[in-house]
Image (spheres, grey):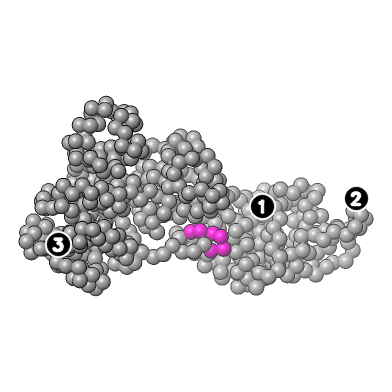
Amino acid sequence: MILMTEVPTILFADRNPQDQAICIRLFEEIAPNNLYLCKNIPELTDTLAQHDINLLFLDLLLFPEKDCLAKLDTIQQKYPNLLIIAAIPQGNHTLEQEILNSNLFFYVTTPYNETEVQLALKRSLAKLNLQPSVLSTKLRKRKPAFYGMIGETVIMQNLFDLITKVSEDDFATVLIRGESGTGKELVAKAIHCHSSRKNNNFVPVNCAAIPDDLLESELFGYTKGAFTGAAQNKIGRIQYADGGTLFLDEIGDMKPSLQAKLLRVLQEREFEPVGGLKATPVDIRVVAATHCDLEQLVSEGKFREDLYYRLSVIPLLIPPLKDRKEDIPILLDAFLDLHATKRGREKFTIPLTVMSALLSYDWKGNVRELENLVQQMAILCSGREIQLQDLPERLIINYDADIVDHDLINNILTGISSPNCVSENESSQSKAVLPSSNEWKDGQVDFKELINDYESQLIIKAMKITEGNKKEAAKLLNLKRTTLLEKIKKKNLHGMWE
């Protein structure tokens, strides 16, 4: 990834750019050699196409008023990495309302006010510096799932590459290691499906789920009369996997006597069913998995050392979810699609406050725990948006919004593909409210302006929830109705929630 350069490239699109001395001076202070001016639609289109623009300062009335919002939306879709500051005529409440409902970072009013433009530029530059996505190229599309596995982080992409290489060899045993819930069986299936054995059986065996006295016969099968109740021959899973892949999950729980028999299968490529006298050749690839520390079990004498080395010819380690939190929004988006569709309900969204709590959680159950949460929400959450109080207590009991690393959260949400599950309006508004680390260091935090912005957002949100009922909105905000009316009037917020 390429980080934002110190000097951004700015395009000032205005009907009369040469007459806007205030704006030109402020822009030239920031980007003296990276400033482009245009005064009509053809010039705007050509400049955007020919140059890598980071920030577009756009006079919306460059377009006919009835078309300006549609044109703005077209620009946003064509240039998803472009940060746009819209300029709208003062007092045009219809446009203001539409802008507030759009996924726009910031807007100013005309005639231009130096303080307002300066604040918009300052906040825009802070956002550009926070955003590690490539600004000079198109936002890359989300990568498709790799045999059911989702991950865009470097460690997951490296794992996918390693699986591809491992699959080219059909015989070497593979030992998959990872915490419970990381997707060890998915990795084993991916190895099988990507190999030349894909048209034969993939046979999973959970060594921890089958009692010790049954596991041997499940694996090796038995002959008629081998023991009381053996009325006929039974094919074991090793034989059933002939030509394909045998997946031994939780191999660390296998008892020592079975470990010895499994070692013979790996060494000699043959097996003997329980009660049998003749070895049967078999062509299988063995993929084993464990969440245990097998080296520790070997040192304690609980696992055969020779079997350990036979199994771990090719070791694969699946990272826990806490080490790849950048993938959480993408996983959430995929799980929401899956489970909302399955239950015939509309896909709900996740506000930034909830996303922050999810990104701050350790996820000891890994991807399985995350998917289980989404299923739970799909069943129990009746609204169109998940709220913090909807989450299980374990996720929020230690969550403190005051100590959240907001810069890290912003980087996670903007560093890969923007997740569709995050409420876009709240996401963009919240990022606009939170000062960047650079602003803190440089002493540029405008406390009054930030509080004023946040108050406005809270009021608009409350009025939207209550469908314009000021009395109910005041209750939600824990304000007196007269106080709410006074703030709406002072901030000129009338109609912005409709």
C-beta proximity under 8 Å, tags 3 and 1: no
Residue beneath the point at 43% across and 47% down = 349
| Secondary element type, mark 1 | loop
In the rendered image, which residue does mark 2 sit on? 229
Closer to us: 253 or 51: 51
Hey, what amino acid is under mark 1?
Glu
Secondary structure under tag 3 reads loop
Q: Distance between the residues labelled 2 and 1?
A: 28 Å
Label 3 sits on what residue type?
A: Asp
Instruction: Give, as a single range, the part of the protein colored magenta.
Output: 146-151
The residue drawn where x is 21% and y is 47% is: 93
Indicate which disc, 2 or 1, sits on the residue closer to the N terminus: 2
Judged left or right of residue 228, residue 344 is left
On residue 250, the disc is: 1
Dominant SS of magenta comes to: loop
Q: Circle 2 — which element?
A: loop
Q: Which of marks 2 and 3 is nearer the N terminus?
A: 3
| Closer mark to the observer between disc 3 and disc 1 | 3
User: In this rendering, would 237 be left or right of 416?
Assistant: right
Mark 3 closeness class: few <14, some 14–19, many ≥20 residues within 10 Å = many
Q: Is residue 313 visible?
A: no
> Does any portion of residue 271 appear in the rendered image?
yes
